[in-house]
């Protein structure tokens, strides 16, 4: 199929991320599925299309851009651990700065959690995943794939900041200053919960390593 499948998967991925969250479609979907149902369905759709997109990149014509060296395989292995930990600490946490804004009204700037270091932890995890996987995949299809994701993560964070400043007014600046004013290592409100999240992040890391050959047809471990 040449580049046709990869192009189609890329178009479907961005369309599936843009269309459901824009009015008037999102309110209609939430009315049918409920807020939690919408989030679960949107997450499942995103994951399924992402798996397809990565698989399609692997089936696209191979056009080498740089020589792959053994050391490059260690880059995603190292980077994915902090990416998984960031995800575990960020998912379903109150964050008025993020694109989802889950439970933003419950955000306590005195206990900002992962947002003490980053306003958009999900996008930081995405950028780590993308740029780390770019290194050992020196062919055109994967450079396009991971380069687009990495660039999207960096650009989207700036666009979200601009939108949130406009929507929140002076409150955005006050909350942003307050979340950065605390200690560099903020004390979690629930230490046990934070420990469980970190353990889940480690579990996700090892789970991705174990499932990688089955999902994407290649082991992430250096031979």
Image (spheres, grey):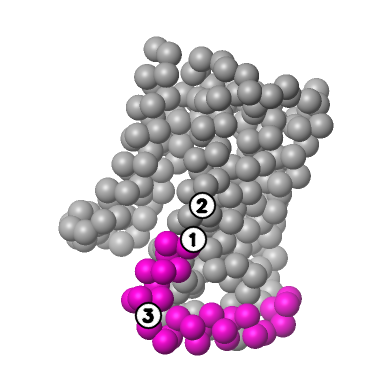
Tag 2 near tag 3, CB within 8 Å: no
Q: Viewer-proximal residue, 71 or 29?
A: 71
User: Label 1: which residue?
Assistant: 157
Residue 176 image point, x, y percent: 53, 80
Please report the bounds of the magenta region as a residue range: 157-186
Q: Is residue 156 left or right of residue 19?
A: right
Residue 174 image point, x, y percent: 50, 87
The quarter of the picture where the N terminus appears is: top left
Q: Quarter of the image holding residue 67? A: top right
User: Vertically, is 204 above or below 177?
Assistant: above
User: Label 2: which residue?
Assistant: 153
Instruction: Tell me the SS state at disc 3.
Output: helix
Q: Residue at x 51, y 32 (%)?
A: 144
Q: CA distance from mark 2 to mark 1?
A: 6 Å
User: Which numbered circle lies on residue 168?
Assistant: 3
Packing grade of label 3 (10 A; few <14, some 14-19, many >=20) is few
Instruction: Tell me the SS state at disc 2.
Output: helix
Residue 212 image point, x, y percent: 62, 31
Q: CA distance from mark 1 to mark 3?
A: 16 Å
Q: CA distance from mark 2 to mark 3?
A: 22 Å
Q: Residue at x 37, y 69 (%)?
A: 163
User: Vertically, is 188 above or below 201?
Assistant: below
User: Which numbered circle lies on residue 170?
Assistant: none
Q: Is residue 41 visible?
A: no
Q: Residue at x 68, y 46 (%)?
A: 80
For marks 2 and 3, the one nearer the N-term is 2
Q: Viewer-proximal residue, 196 or 186?
A: 186
């Amino acid at each position: 199929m040449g580049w046709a499948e990869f192009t189609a998967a890329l178009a479907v991925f961005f369309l599936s991320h843009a269309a459901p969250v824009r009015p008037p479609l999102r309110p209609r979907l939430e009315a049918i599925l409920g807020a939690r149902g919408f989030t679960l369905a949107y997450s499942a759709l995103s994951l399924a299309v992402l798996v397809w997109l990565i698989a399609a990149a692997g089936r696209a014509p191979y056009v080498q851009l740089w020589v792959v060296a053994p050391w490059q395989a260690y880059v995603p292995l190292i980077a994915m651990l902090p990416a998984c930990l960031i995800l575990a600490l960020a998912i379903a946490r109150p964050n008025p700065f993020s694109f989802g804004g889950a439970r933003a009204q419950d955000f306590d700037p005195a206990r900002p959690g992962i947002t003490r270091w980053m306003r958009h932890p999900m996008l930081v995890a995405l950028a780590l995943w993308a740029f780390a996987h770019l290194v050992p995949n020196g062919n055109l299809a994967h450079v396009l794939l991971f380069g687009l994701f990495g660039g999207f993560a960096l650009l989207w964070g700036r666009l979200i900041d601009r939108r949130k400043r406009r929507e929140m007014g002076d409150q955005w600046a006050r909350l942003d200053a307050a979340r950065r004013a605390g200690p560099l290592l903020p004390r979690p409100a629930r230490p046990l919960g934070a420990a469980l999240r970190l353990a889940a992040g480690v579990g996700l890391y090892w789970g991705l390593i174990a499932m990688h050959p089955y999902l994407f047809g290649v082991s992430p471990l250096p031979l």
